[in-house]
Image (spheres, rainbow, N blue to C red):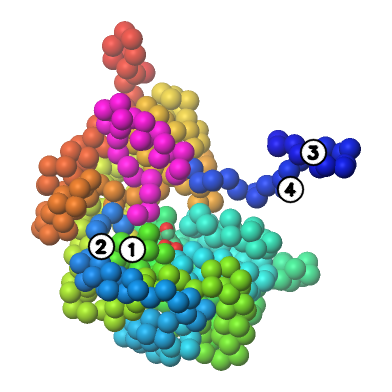
Amino acid sequence: MALTTIPGMSIIEPALGAAPSFGVSATLAANEILAARHRRGEPVLHMAFGEAGLDVHPLLRDALADAAGRNGYGPVAGLPALREAAAGYWTRRDLPTTPDQVVTGPGSKALLFGLIAAIGGDVVLPRPSWVSYAAQASLAGVQARLVPGAAGVPEAARVANVAAAARAAGRPVRAVIVTVPDNPTGLLAQASAIRALCAVAEQHNLVIISDEIYRDLIFDAAPPYTSPSAFSAERTVVTSGVSKNLALGGWRLGVVRLPEGPLGAELRDRLLAIASEIWSAPAAPVQEAAALAFREPAALVAHVAASRRLHARVARAVAARFAAHGAVVPTPQAAFYVYPGFGPVADVLRHKHGITADTDLAGLLLRRYGVGVLPGSAFGEESWRLRLRVACSMLYGSTSERRSAALASDDPCALPWIAESLDRLDEVLAEVVSLRITGPGGARDA
Ligand code: PLP
């Protein structure tokens, strides 16, 4: 602990107050281990990070360069051209939106934090759910209540119970977050689950935050898309951005659609107050380029369609590798994630490696084999379920040429560098779950 002596005071006290309830993400630690292995020339499979793994489209690159001279802060809610374009994006998706309903920010992550703080009460999250929601709730000084669910939507009946108990205890829940489609599971919620949750939200007066950042990356065979705004328009806040569909995570640009009516107006005022004291506005040149993105010219629509196809093919191939080695794996429906569970081979993992928790499994894959994945427990999942969140998008290639070839290919998994990664994954999984023990005396049966 850092100690500071304050001049004129005889007391020695720590320089810092209480630490946040969470640390720097496990992905950073994994990154360092993978980088060290890479430097030593050892095989590495980067599957821990939620980067879209593709390059910036030239149209967007040019739009950003052309706007480099924009150096004013601009309005807190975002440039009118961007808000208008984002309103058009939602309107084209059957969600009529006016520019006044749109607030922009430096990534939807920052906006989500702003929303949680603006709502100012406890929040229900699906278990499992994206790592940052619970951490943000804690930063905002509210409690996150994890409720089991499927595909990014907490189970309605359980949410009703939690909300009723919280109200009776004098500390009502104010909001529920859904992720449609979902990270970590890569699944798209059924309309019936969303409809049931909306009914509970109405009953208990909950704001619904619908994180729809992966909406444009839904694979062909997935069920039809349903947003909670279809059922509960007046209490649903939708967040989105350009990080995933257009691989612009580092540009830090996100958008919120606030509902029409008094709740939306009040939330807008509160969110803008928070934004004005933290980020002022997203970077102006990025806003200009993002306005082009949300206008969706044909070339960008085709680019997103190609990336969706690539994500689908590689995610399915990765899922098949895990399934072939005994894991239970839901067929990926969106984004670029696979969510295998090693429950069916739990006995082998315990017997052979002494593994009973997902963190140990992720640790083994990382340290012994250079395979970076995240344990399900990082997403609030119970550790004994032995689930892993596997991101496939870093397999597309380490150079621009390779990533472009992957994007253009009808059979990306046959490209040598992707095939090599899939083979390596096969080899590692075979070794991890095989009942044969390899040691100094050679292989023998366990
Ligand atoms: N929501 C989910 C579910 C995500 O997975 C991510 C990024 O990983 C974000 C939000 C944040 O996206 P942004 O880059 O817009 O901050």
The stretch of residues the image draws in magenta is 27-51
- Which image quarter has ligand 1? bottom left
**Which residue is the site of mark 2?**
56
Q: Earlier in the sequence, mark 4 or mark 3?
A: 3
Distance from the alpha carbon under mark 1 to that under mark 4: 36 Å
On residue 17, the disc is 4
Check disc 3 and report its element: helix, strand or loop: strand
- In the image: residue 74, left or right of residue 165: left
Quadrant of the frame with the C terminus: top left
Q: Is residue 215 at all visible to an observer of this figure?
A: no
**Which residue is the site of mark 3?**
5
Distance from the alpha carbon under mark 3 to that under mark 2: 50 Å
- The answer to whether the residues at label 1 and label 2 have Cβ atoms under 8 Å apart is yes
- Residue name at image x 31 percent, y 21 percent: 436
- Residue name at image x 11 percent, y 56 percent: 409
x and y percent of residue 247 in the render? Answer: 31, 61
Q: Amino acid at mark 2?
A: Val
Distance from the alpha carbon under mark 4 to that under mark 3: 15 Å
Q: Is residue 422 above or below residue 86?
A: above
On residue 201, the disc is none
Q: Residues within 10 Å of mark 4 (few under 14, many from 20)?
A: few
x and y percent of residue 83 in the render? Answer: 41, 83
Q: Earlier in the sequence, mark 3 or mark 2?
A: 3
Q: Earlier in the sequence, mark 1 or mark 2?
A: 2
Q: Earlier in the sequence, mark 1 or mark 4?
A: 4
Check disc 2 and report its element: helix, strand or loop: loop
Distance from the alpha carbon under mark 2 to that under mark 4: 41 Å
Mark 1 near ligand 1 (CB under 8 Å)?
A: no
Which quarter of the picture shows residue 277? bottom right
Q: Is residue 242 above or below residue 44?
A: below
Q: Amino acid at mark 3?
A: Thr
